[in-house]
Image (cartoon, grey):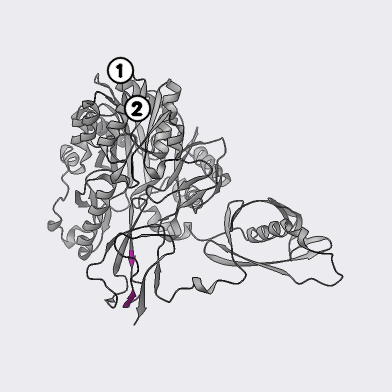
Amino acid sequence: MITSVLVANRGEIACRVFRTCRAWGVRTVAVHSDADANALHTREADAAVRLPGAAPADTYLRGDLIVKAAVAAGADAVHPGYGFLSENADFARAVRDAGLVWIGPPPEAIEAMASKTRAKELMGVAPLTDAALVTEADLPVLVKAAAGGGGRGMRVVRRLADLDAELTAARAEATSAFGDGEVFVEPYLENGRHVEVQILADSHGTVWALGTRDCSLQRRHQKVIEESPAPGLPPGLTAELHDLAVRAARAVDYVGAGTVEFLVADGRAHFLEMNTRLQVEHPVTEAVFGIDLVALQLRIAEGHALEADPPRARGHAVEARLYAEDPASGWAPQTGRLHRLTVPDSIRLDTGYTDGDDIGVHYDPMLAKAVAHAPTRAEAVRRLAGALERAVIHGPVTNRDLLVRSLRHEEFTSGRMDTGFYDRHLADLTRSAPDPLAPLAAALADAATHAGRFGGWRNLPSQPQVKRYAVAGEEHEVRYHHTRDGLTAEGVHVVHAGLDRVVLETDGVQRRFDIARYGDRIHVNTTALTALPRFPDPTTQHAPGSLLAPMPGTVVRVAEGLTEGTTVQAGQPLLWLEAMKMEHRITAPVTGRLTALPAGLGRQVEMGALLAVVESD
C-alpha cells in the first residue's frame, strides 16, 4: 500500500496530486528549484527537497536528483505529473530500480509511445522524418519535437526557405523543455479539430475509453480551452476514436492514465500521438464521469483492478487555461507579483499560485485551470464565461479577457471551431475595449484618498484636476473638479468616491467600481491601469529603432555574424530570447544598420531592457 508520494513536478499539477493524496491519507513530498523555494506546491507538501538551481535542465529534468530526493524523504512512490520527466522511460526505470512505486505506465510503453515518430509507425502512420525530402508540394509542414508535449518544439513551415531555421529553433526549444532535441516533419493539416480520448488501463487487462475531449482552441499549438465530450461528432466517429485509443493502449500493454490524440478533418480521424501521462485537461473528464483520475492512478499502481466498464458520462464540462501572458503582444509571457486570484465558487479552480506569489521567468506561465460542469454544453460554457468575467485577478496581464470572449464567440458556442480559430479571430478577440469609466473611477478614488490635504474651499471656480493613465497600451486623460459639494466630473454624477470603492451614475444607471492599488498599478473591477507621471522622465526615452525586451528572459542565440555596423533587412532575426520555456524571436523592424547590440549571448534581461538598435536607411 502506498503511504508517501513524491511528485516529480511543480506548480498546479503538484498541488492537484497532493489534494488527492491528502484525501487518501497519503503523505506528500515536493521537490523544488531555488526559484520555487516558496512556491505553493512547496508550501503545501508535508516535506520538500531542494533541487539546486533554477533552470529546468538543472532541476526538474534531473531524474537522478529526484530519485535521491524520494529516497531521502522516505517516499515509497513517485508521481511524475505532466511535462518534464513524465514521459521519460529511463526515469521510470530509475524509480523502479530504487525500489519505489512508479505511478505511471511501464517504461516499455513509454518508450514505444513517447517518441511520436515510433508511435506513428506503431499505428501504421509514417511521418516525413527526413527534412531533406520535403518539397514545395509538401507545404505546409509541421516541425514537431519527438518527445514531450505542450506545443513546445513545434513550428508550422509555409515556405521551404524557412525550414532549416525552424528546425534549428524547434531542436533548441525541445532540448530546453524535454532534454531531447529530436524533431521530425509531417504534413500540416489546416483547420482540423483536435480531438482526444482519455484512456485508463489496469494491470489485469481492462482498458477504459473515457469519452472524448475537444481541444481545438490552441495558441502556439498549446491548448487554451478544452471540453468533454467533443461536440458534434457523429456516433460512428466517436466509436472509431474509442476503438483506436483502446487499440493503441493494448498494442503496448499500457497501464495507467494516458491520452490518445487525433486530428479530425473531413470526417476522418488522423492519429497524432499518445501521451503516456495525465493531461492538463483531465479535469473535464473527471467532471463528466464523476471520477478522480489521480485516485484511480494510485489504485492501479497498488495493483487494484478497474471495474469491467467505466462509469456513465453525465453532462458537459469546459476548461479554460488562465495564463500570465499578453495575447495582443504575440502571447508574450508576463511576470511579477500575483496580488490576488479569486473565482466564484460555481467553478473548479486548479492552481499552483495564491495571493502574493511571484510569477517568474523559468517555467510555463499557466496560472490556473478553471473548469465548469453543467447538464448541457450551453450551460457549462455560460457558467465558465460568467465566472471568469467575475474573477478577481490582480497582477500581471493575463489572457482572461481573451478566454471570456472566446467562450462567447459564435463559432465556439455553435461548436464549429477548429485549430485555426485564433489565426482567424485573434485580432478581434484582443481588440482593446477597456471600461471608459475606469480611469475616472481610479482618479476619483485617488482624489478622495488625498482630500484631507486640501485647504478651505473658495468661492472661485476651481481648475480641473488632470490625471493620466495607461490602459491596454493606450494613454487616457481624465479631468474632475473639487467643489464645496465634493468631487464632480462632466457628464457623470459621482454618487460615492472612496479609497476602495467609487459609484458613478450615468443616464440614471449607477455602477460600482472596486479599486485596488499596488504601487502605480491600479485595478478597477476587471480593468488594469498604470498611473502615469505628470511629467514623463526624459531619461526613459529610447532612440528610434530601439528593440526592447518584450518580457524578462535570457538571450540564448544571436544571429551568426551579427555585430555593430552590420546591415540587416526588415524582418531578419537578430537574436532569440528564452522566457518561460519558450523561444521568442527578435527581428529587425526596418532595413538598415545595426548601431548597437548591448544584449549579448547568455545575458539575462528584464522587460523593457534595450536589446539592439537598428538605424533605418
Instruction: Give above or below for 461 relative to 250.
Output: below
The quadrant of the rendering that contains the N terminus is top left
Marking on residue 73: 2
The quadrant of the rendering that contains the C terminus is bottom left
Quarter of the view holding residue 610: bottom left
Left or right of residue 531: residue 424? left
Marking on residue 246: none
Marking on residue 305: 1
Q: Tell which of 229 and 102 is nearer to you.
A: 102
> At which x and y percent is residue 77?
31, 25
Q: Tell which of 196 and 501 is nearer to you.
A: 501
Residue in the image at 32% along x and 47% along y: 55
> At which x and y percent is residue 136?
18, 62
Q: Amino acid at mark 2?
A: Ala
What secondary structure is found at the residue carrying circle 2? Answer: helix
Quarter of the view holding residue 254: top left
> At which x and y percent is residue 102?
28, 27
Q: Name the dominant secondary structure of the magenta segment.
A: strand
Magenta residues (range): 586-596
Q: Amino acid at mark 1?
A: Ala
Instruction: Give above or below for 171 relative to 6.
Output: below
Q: Residues within 10 Å of mark 2 (few under 14, many from 20)?
A: some
What secondary structure is found at the residue carrying circle 1? Answer: loop
